Image: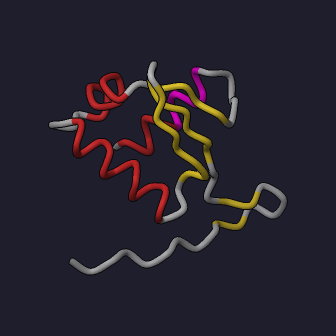
Amino acid sequence: MLYINLLLKWQEQEHNLVLHITSYEMCNESNLGSRSNYFRYMRELLEWGYINGYRKGTNGAVVEMKFLYNPADGQIVPLPRTKSR
């Protein structure tokens, strides 16, 4: 849900690849129970290659989006395997 909400923010912010978000806003929209879950999921999105960058700031965060397909040929980029827990 968090990644889908990031995509919705990307659309709202006129397809700018650098998003300005707040953790409270994203927790509310993604129905996350706590900010610690939000930060863990953002770290996982970064580690697994769903986003290019994530930087916390005083008035929110800056997220650099990454798309999971190659627009030139329409092929879907293979995702990395998830870690077993």
x, y percentage for residue 68? 61, 58
Closer to us: 69 or 34: 34
The image shows residue 59 at horizontal and vertical percentages of 45, 19
Q: Residue furthest left?
A: 33
The vertical placement of 11 against 49, above or below, is above
Q: Is residue 38 toward the left or the right of residue 81 in the image?
A: left
Residue at (64%, 66%) from the top-left corner? 76
Residue 23 in the figure: left or right of residue 59: left
Q: Residue at x 58, y 30 (%)?
A: 19
Q: Position of residue 30 (x, y in %)?
A: 30, 34
Q: Main structural element of the magenta stretch: helix, strand or loop? A: helix
Report the side of 81 relative to 78 (left or right). Answer: left
Tell me, yes or no, whether the highlighted magenta stretch contains residue 8.
Answer: yes
The residue located at (74%, 61%) in the rendering is 70
- Residue drawn at 63 percent across, 52 percent down: 67
Placement of 61 over or under 2, stated as above or below: above
Residues in magenta?
A: 7-12
- Left or right of 62? Residue 59 is left
